[in-house]
Amino acid sequence: MTRGLIERLLRPLAFQLGILIQEMQPDIATATLPRFGNTPRNVRIDFPRRLVNPERIFLGDGVWLGPGSLLIALHRYPAAPMQNPERPPLEQQQFHSRIVIGNRVTATGDLQIAAHREITVEDDVMFATNVNLTDGLHGYETAQEPYKYQPIFKIAPIVIRRGCWIGQNVVVMPGVTIGEHSIVGANSVVTRSLPARCIAVGAPARVVHQWDEATGAWVATDAVLERRV
């Protein structure tokens, strides 16, 4: 039997095996989840994923995070790759961090959450692809030292209130609270807290629309200000 004939016979089997593996991935992903800080129900975090210190991560029920998710609750810095090999090691920073994610939170994929103190995502928040929430920054107090070797600083909690929609490629900076039922547009960098029921876009993000309870509609920010004056 020639090699070509063997390949033709095996190709349909390989195709069916690939379909079977793909269909089983969600079940495998769920079955291999680590033990978190609580015991959530009906949680799915697709492969590939990276979950660091899951005992410091608390999930609500019905959470569904797409592939490429990275959830890190740090407890010390720096690790070996972040230490300058030409100098004595820095004194390690110690963190008592937590990540708290509410019920029915969803993310399309590539969600990155890195907590040094606490990051809270309330119920029914929707993340698009490639969103970054980090509650601390690499130090840049001097330009004489590579930034990866400087201590983490400006650590402040992040809160995403319930019902928000966070668009693709959004970055949320330390100390930010995003009010409930707000929308952050794609490619925005949120450097300051946002009120409830607003639409914010840009880098840095600014509020461009606000929900008007009187009319039951979104209105431009300037119109809201004029009405209040």
Image (tube, rainbow, N blue to C red):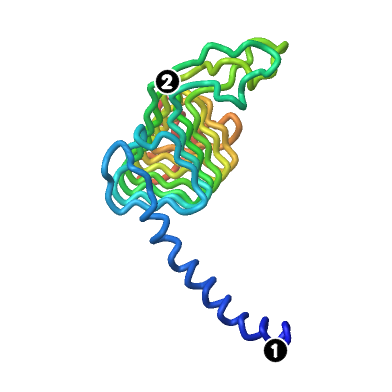
Above or below, 107 relative to 132: below
- Furthest-bottom residue in view? 1
8 vs 205, nearest the viewer:
8
Q: Quadrant of the C terminus?
A: top left
For image coordinates 61% across by 24% down, the residue present is: 82
- Residue closest to the eye, 144 or 124: 144
Residue 110 visible to the viewer: yes
Q: Quadrant of residue 87?
A: top right
- The residue wearing badge 1 is 1
Q: Residue at x 66, y 18 (%)?
A: 84
Query: For the point 58% across and 25% down, which residue is it?
Result: 80
Residue for badge 2: 95
| Amino acid type shown at disc 1 | Met
Q: Earlier in the sequence, mark 2 or mark 1?
A: 1
Q: Nearer the viewer, residue 137 or 158?
A: 137
The image quadrant that residue 148 belongs to is top right
Residue 55, position as x, y percentages in the image: 34, 35
Which x, y percent locates residue 37?
Answer: 30, 36
Q: What percent of the width, then of the height, locates residue 223?
A: 48, 35
Given contact means CB atoms under 8 Å apart, are the residues at marks 2 and 1 in contact? no
Measure the alpha-carbon separation of dots 2 and 1: 64 Å
Q: Nearer the viewer, residue 119 or 21?
A: 21
For label 1, count other residues whose C-alpha is less than 10 Å away and answer few (under 14), some (14-19) or many (20+). Answer: few
Q: Is residue 129 above or below residue 179?
A: below
Per the image, label 2 sits on a secondary structure element best described as loop
Q: Between label 2 and label 1, give the one nearer the viewer.
A: 1
Q: Secondary structure at mark 1?
A: loop
Determine the residue positioned at 59% across, 13% down.
89
Three-letter amino acid code of the residue under disc 2: Phe
Q: Count neighbours of disc 2 (C-alpha within 10 A) and say few if under 14, some if 14 to 19, many if 20 or more.
A: some
